[in-house]
Amino acid sequence: MFESKNFKILLLFVFIGLLSCSSDSPTTNPVPEVDTDGDGILDSKEITDGTDKNNACDPIRNSGYTAFSASNSIWAAADCDNDGVTNGAEVTNGTDPYIDDLDTDGDGLLDSEEIADGTDKNNPCDPVHDADYDEYNATNANWAAADCDGDGVINGDEVLNSTDPYVDDREYAVAELLPNLSELKVFDGPLEDLKFNRTAHEYSLITPLYTDYAYKLRSISLPKNAKMTYNGEGLLAFPDNTVITKTFYYLNDERDATIGKKIIETRVLIKKNGSWVMGEYIWNDAQTEAILEESDDVKVVLVDYKNTEGEWESVAYEVPNMTACIQCHNNNGTTFPIGPKSRNMNFEYLGKNQIEYFVDKNMLTGAPAVNQIAVLPDWESTSETVENRARAYMEVNCAHCHQPGGFNGNPVVETLDFRFETPYTNTNISAKKADIIERINSGFPNFSMPYTGTTIKHTEGISLIEDYIDSLD
């Protein structure tokens, strides 16, 4: 009996001892499951399946798969759809990292398609699309900034204007002397607004012609796909069907242009078959239209306006007849424009150098850098010498007649050569000083100079020429 009891007690102590030993032994932690490449598949399964646990794009996944770990650096740096954009960037951009949906230029064609087709994945206008194409991505900055129809309006603005970015819908000037100025399609909207259409390009001259203090608005319209050609510092070479306009007007109050204006005339030069033809359009009293003048009469238009000092001025403005126009624009029997010489347009106007503007607009070819082109002095610039200012003024206001062949080869007129490039010793100014002063101060018709286009003496211009003449030996 005693032995049996003691045996049980002994077993109890042995059991307690075993428990004590067991509790003192270390606990074995399970090995955590790992997804090294962040593709959403545990390494153990990749090993079992024979895929690469270090390759975020193995196995291949279909579009719409989302079990990946976007925070995993291996996965984020990979490009599982081979579209040139990393998985991480695709997540940031909200695109699918498992489908090639990259369209760099926004033209609606995937980059991979463009590469296969041999088109430019960075050019929104390659390949060329027909009218009504609408697969483009209007929010793509590359596409929005392009001009796929070459009409001078970028794609993004075409979308905003509800016009077709793949159709050149520009209106080009009509190179004909039609009865009404509006029919020439140079202006857009109400004619009296003098707003040019997109193919009529405003320009100005650094030293302009004086015409009884009238304002002038000038434009050049080229036919579609045609260009002007640089021809040295002189007159640009224009293609056939070029339309050049010059509109003369007075502000009702020179202190405030918003009060309105009185438009008098628009002179038009059109190049046809290598020759220039001229037309004169007279504006009606309602300022709604200008009519082609058929007679050779001089028209007089009375104008009252307030000058910059708020004082009333009155002008009996003479619209020259066609005979007078020909006299100025003709040299040895050939008619041509007078103003648009490269040296007289080589300055900044409307925010950009005009020569550079024409080049950038693909309107002018052959021009060197603008710093390689001569610049006619500004007759009003006090930074120029009196001689340069006066010679520039006489070039623009007088030289169309006073040069070899001028005034249709009149020998009396040819005794003076007022072209700016003519050396002083060849101008004959020295011998004619007294005659020049008398003529510019005369005020008598058919004697006073300039011969045509003025009824009011140009006080500032006369003063400049007098200062120049006085400075000569």
Image: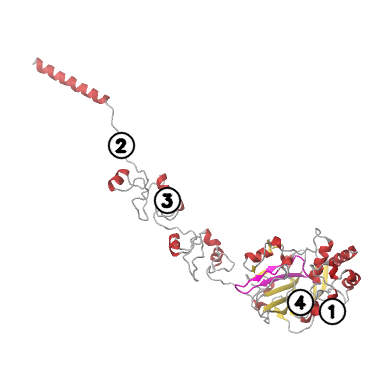
Instruction: Residue under label 1, please give it.
Output: 411
x, y percent for residue 221: 65, 73
Classify residue 3 by image quadrant: top left
At a point 71% along the width and 75% down the height, the residue shown is 287
Instruction: Work out whether mark 3 precedes mark 1 in sequence or the reverse, and give the earlier one.
Output: 3
Residue for point 79% across, 60% down = 381
Packing grade of label 3 (10 A; few <14, some 14-19, many >=20) is: many
What is the x, y in percent for residue 109? 45, 63
Q: Which residue is mark 4?
A: 329
Magenta residue span: 202-231
Task: Indicate the position of residue 315 as horizontal and vertical percent values.
Answer: 82, 73
Q: Which quadrant of the view contains residue 329?
A: bottom right
Earlier-in-chain disc, 1 versus 4: 4
Residue lying furthest left in this view? 1
Label 2 to label 4: alpha-carbon separation: 98 Å
Along the line of sight, the residue nearer the viewer: 324 or 432: 432
